[in-house]
Amino acid sequence: MDKVIRIGTRDSQLAVWQATWVQELLKEKGIASELVYIKSEGDIDLVTPLYEIGVQGIFTKTLDAALLSKKIDIAVHSMKDVPTQLAKGIRAAAVLKRASHKDLLVYKEDTTPEVVGFVNGEWSMVNNDSLTIHHSPFTIATSSVRRKAQWLNRYPHHRFDNLRGNVNTRLRKLEESNWQGAIFAAAGLERIGLRPEKSIELDWMLPAPAQGAVMIVCRTEDETIFEQCHQLNHHNTAICATAERQFLRVLMGGCATPISALAEITGDELILKGNVLSLDGQQKIEVYKKAPILKAEYIGTEAAKEVTEKGGAEIIRAIRNNGS
């Protein structure tokens, strides 16, 4: 009798959705599996901002420990949460087809005549009667320094509050708050059917490397499970996410550094856009590179080196020296 694969997952609605997706894909291949729920440190601490916790892999290390101790056979992660250097004894088994890579602003509407909205591409407060535009210093909620820095680069007069918790918790906190909006990953809300009507895709905001992708990891020595899971690998997503994470790894970025990257395949070319910003959004170094897919193995490394030479190294050094 074939072994039933034990799938380790966090117990949030989104994490369970992702693990169940893997379970269904394995079932289509004739492979039996079961879910094993494990709570991560990132789920337990819902107050401290991620960048203050200061631990890469905050949402993955508990599952990785369970994997290495053989309590589970595979772990399912949002790929953007996975450290670029996997723990010793663990390897990537598959990257699933990417959903939306975009960030999403979920906004609130006041019951007063003034309505929060976009006017001529600018985020503003509009009076319905006079159509007067008021550039109020809005308060936006997020725990991501990447999202905060890119937003401040575009809207430097706005304010930010920290927002932690799973998707459901963050949506509830937004509803109960006096914030004008909060930023989410579109894929997370859409996968579990919670994207509000009052939401706008931030097309100008570059995502976290591998945002929207899901990764399956297994023990390095477990060849049978690797081969079973690798059947689920989506080749193009894996190529793009690998290039983005390569960019992140070379820049040695983590939760405390505003580093963004997006790789996309167009025809037979791989196009990579990346940036690094100062925490206040005032400094921004961008890069754009493209190469034939067959020659793009190191495009992320090349893009990171270009950013470094253009001033990115100084930005990252300043962030570290500030103890962030």
Image (cartoon, grey):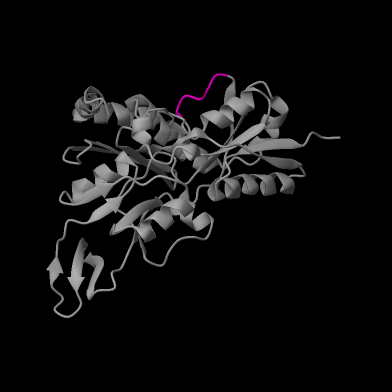
Q: Residue 143 location, x and y as percent?
A: 34, 43
| Relative image position of residue 171 (x, y in whole percent) | 42, 56
Task: Tell me if 293 is positioned left or right of 77 in this view.
Answer: left
Q: Which segment is the magenta one? A: 83-88
Is 159 above or below relative to 61? Answer: below
Viewer-closest of 71 and 286: 71
Quarter holding the N terminus is top right
Quarter of the rendering containing residue 53: top left
Q: In the figure, is residue 43 to the left or right of 107?
A: right
Residue at 45%, 28% (x, y): give it: 84
Q: Position of residue 26 (x, y in %)?
A: 70, 44
Q: How many marks?
A: 0
> Does residue 138 appear anywhere in the picture?
yes
Q: Is residue 219 visible?
A: no
Query: 53 or 264, which is in the foreground?
Result: 53
The answer to whether 314 is drawn above or below residue 183 in the figure is above
Q: Quadrant of the C terminus?
A: top left
Tell which residue pokes out farthest to the right in this image: 1
Closer to us: 170 or 287 = 170
Position of 274 with respect to 119 (left or right) is right
The residue under the point 19% across, 29% down is 311
Could you say where residue 182 lies in the image, as x and y percent from the top left?
34, 54
Magenta stretch, main secondary structure, is loop
Give yes or no for residue 86 being in the magenta stretch. Answer: yes
In the picture as drawn, the residue positioned furthest to the bottom comes out as 129
* Residue 210 in which image quadrant: top left
Q: Magenta stretch: residue 26 in it?
A: no
The residue positioned 50% from the left and 47% from the top of the image is: 98
